[in-house]
Image (cartoon, grey):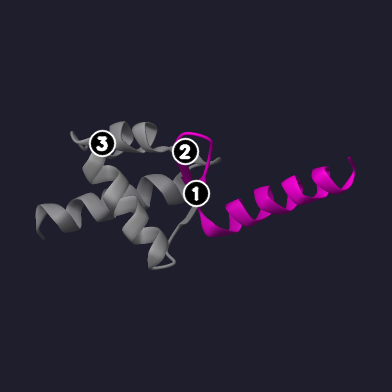
Amino acid sequence: MTEYEKYRESILSVVLKAECPLAIETIRRKAGIKVWETTKALLLELMVEGKIAGLKTGKSWVFSNREKMNVISMAEVNSNDQS
């Protein structure tokens, strides 16, 4: 297994096990990756492949299991409807 494949598997494991969406820096530390840019690139790649969900925030991104992100998105829509 190449280093690239190990990083992808590590990132996927961290994101799928998380209870809530995680920032890139948190994922980087938990996955044991040294370079923030590498982590971001792999997260975006996994998102495009449909393996995880990502949400652009004000300054950065958060990533989560797709089902958990759908629940969060629906809660956000519902709270906006009540305003």
Residue at label 3?
A: 36
Of badges 3 and 2, the one in the foreground is: 3
Query: Pointer 3: residues within 10 angstroms few (<14), some, or many (20+)?
Result: some
Label whose residue precedes the other's in the sequence (1 or 2): 2
Of badges 1 and 3, the one in the foreground is: 3
Q: Position of residue 74 (x, y in %)?
A: 73, 53
> Element under label 3?
helix
Q: Are marks 1 and 2 in contact (CB under 8 Å)?
A: yes
Considering every residue shown, the one lying at the far bottom of the view is 49
Is residue 71 covered in magenta? yes
Give whichever of 4, 9 is nearer the camera: 4
Query: Pointer 2: residues within 10 angstroms few (<14), some, or many (20+)?
Result: some
Label whose residue precedes the other's in the sequence (1 or 3): 3
Q: Is residue 72 left or right of residue 25?
A: right
Residue at the spot 82% in from the left edge and 49% down from the top edge: 78
Residue at the spot 76% in from the left edge and 51% down from the top edge: 77
> Element under label 1?
strand
Q: Which three-letter amino acid code belongs to the residue tagged 2?
A: Leu
Tell me which segment is drawn in magenta: 56-83
Residue at label 1?
A: 64
Is residue 37 covered in magenta? no
Question: Is 51 rendered above or below residue 69?
Answer: below
Question: Is 21 rendered above or below residue 4?
Answer: above
User: In what quadrant of the picture does the N terminus appear?
Assistant: bottom left
Residue at the spot 55% in from the left edge and 40% down from the top edge: 20
Q: CA distance from mark 1 to mark 2?
A: 6 Å
Q: Which mark is residue 22?
A: 2
Q: Which three-letter amino acid code belongs to the residue tagged 3?
A: Trp
Query: Pointer 1: residues within 10 angstroms few (<14), some, or many (20+)?
Result: many
Q: Position of residue 44 (x, y in %)?
A: 36, 55
